[in-house]
Image (tube, grey):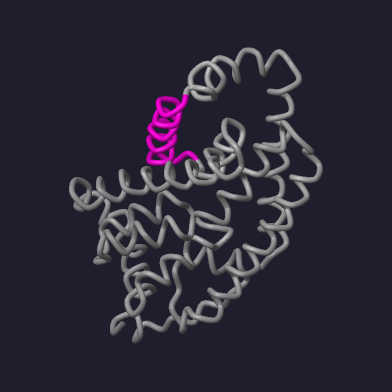
C-alpha cells in the first residue's frame, strides 16, 4: 500500500478531529453543532436516530463520504450506537444508489460504468459475499461508484447489502471513535482510531492481494495499492 494512501486516510481523520474540536470549543460549534446535532438529533431518542439515518442515507447515496457520516454518528451518539447508526446510514445510502442504478439508470450508467461493472462482476463472481466484504475493507475507492457499478452488475441485492454492512463496520468504528473523542479523552481515542485504521487498511490490502486471483477491481485502486495489473484479456472475456 502506497504511503500517500495511508497519509490521505490519516489526514481525513485528523481534519475531522480538528473540525469536531472547533465545534466543541468555539462559536462554530454553537452555530453548526447545536443547530443540527444538538437541536435535532442528540437527546431526541428514536426520532433523532431516525432523522440521522435518513440524513446520512440520503447524503451517502449522492456521494458524501461515509466516513464523515460515521464521524457525525460518533459525535452525536456513543461509540457503540454511533458505529451501528453510521453503518446503517451507509447501508441505506448503498441501497438507494444501488436501487437507482438497477431500476432506473441502467442505460445511461452502462455507458459510463459498463467496464467498471464488468470488472466488479468478474471480481465477485465465485464468492459474491466475501469479495464484497473485501471491497468494503479497502482503504481506497469510491463508495458511490461501487454501489452504482454493483447496481448494473449481476450480483444479488441480498448478498451485496449484507456484505456491505459487514464490511462497513471497521471504518465506521474508526471514524465514530474520532467523532466521540471530541468529548472525552480526544488524544487517546484518536490514537486508537489511527491504530485501527492502519490495521483494517493493511488487512484489506493483504486480503485483496491474497484472494483477487488475478482479477482487477479497478486500475486506479490497483495503482493506489501498488498492485500490478494481471488481468489478461482472455480471462476478462472468460471469467
Image height of 76 relative to 92, above or below: above
Q: Position of residue 116 (x, y in %)?
A: 36, 63
Location of residue 114 by image quarter: bottom left
Q: Residue at x 53, y 41 (%)?
A: 81
**Horizontal relation, residue 127 to residue 111: left or right:** right
Residue 54: horizontal and vertical position, in percent?
Answer: 38, 32
Residue 60 magenta-highlighted: yes
Q: Answer above or below: position of 80 versus 6.
A: above
Quadrant of the rendered structure where residue 201 is? Answer: bottom right
Task: Read off the magenta span.
Answer: 45-64
Q: Main secondary structure of the magenta part?
A: helix
Residue in the image at 55% along x and 49% along y = 172
Q: How many marks?
A: 0
Residue 222: x, y in percent?
54, 69
The quadrant of the image that shows the C terminus is bottom left
Residue 145 drawn in magenta: no
Nearest the eye: 170 or 125: 170
Q: Nearer the viewer, residue 216 or 82?
A: 82
Q: Residue at x 27, y 63 (%)?
A: 153
Counting from the top left corner in percent of width and height, residue 19 is at: 69, 30
Q: Quadrant of the N terminus?
A: bottom right
In the rendered image, the vertical position of residue 159 relative to residue 57, given as above or below: below
Report the side of 31 relative to 149 (left or right): right
Residue 67 figure quarter: top right
The residue depicted at 57 percent of the width and 68 percent of the height is 204
Amino acid at each position: 500500500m502506497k504511503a500517500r494512501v495511508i497519509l490521505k486516510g490519516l489526514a481525513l481523520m485528523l481534519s475531522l478531529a480538528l473540525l469536531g474540536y472547533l465545534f466543541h470549543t468555539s462559536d462554530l460549534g454553537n452555530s453548526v453543532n447545536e443547530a443540527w446535532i444538538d437541536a435535532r438529533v442528540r437527546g431526541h431518542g428514536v426520532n433523532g436516530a431516525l432523522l440521522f439515518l435518513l440524513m446520512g442515507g440520503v447524503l451517502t447515496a449522492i456521494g458524501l463520504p461515509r466516513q464523515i457520516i460515521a464521524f457525525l454518528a460518533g459525535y452525536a451518539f456513543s461509540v457503540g450506537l454511533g458505529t451501528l447508526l453510521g453503518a446503517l446510514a451507509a447501508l441505506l445510502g448503498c441501497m438507494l444508489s444501488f436501487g437507482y442504478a438497477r431500476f432506473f439508470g441502467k442505460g445511461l450508467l452502462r455507458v459510463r460504468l459498463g467496464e467498471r461493472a464488468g470488472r466488479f462482476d468478474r471480481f465477485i463472481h465465485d464468492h459474491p459475499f466475501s469479495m464484497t466484504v473485501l471491497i468494503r475493507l479497502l482503504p481506497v475507492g469510491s463508495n458511490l461508484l461501487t454501489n452504482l457499478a454493483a447496481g448494473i452488475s449481476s450480483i444479488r441485492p441480498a448478498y451485496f447489502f449484507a456484505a456491505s454492512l459487514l464490511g462497513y463496520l471497521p471504518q465506521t468504528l474508526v471514524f465514530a471513535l474520532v467523532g466521540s473523542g471530541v468529548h472525552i479523552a480526544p488524544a487517546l481515542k484518536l490514537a486508537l482510531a489511527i491504530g485501527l485504521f492502519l490495521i483494517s487498511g493493511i488487512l484489506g490490502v493483504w486480503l485483496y492481494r491474497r484472494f483477487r486471483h488475478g482479477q482487477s477491481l479497478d486500475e486506479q485502486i490497483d495503482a493506489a495499492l501498488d498492485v500490478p495489473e494481471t488481468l489478461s484479456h482472455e480471462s476478462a472475456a472468460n471469467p
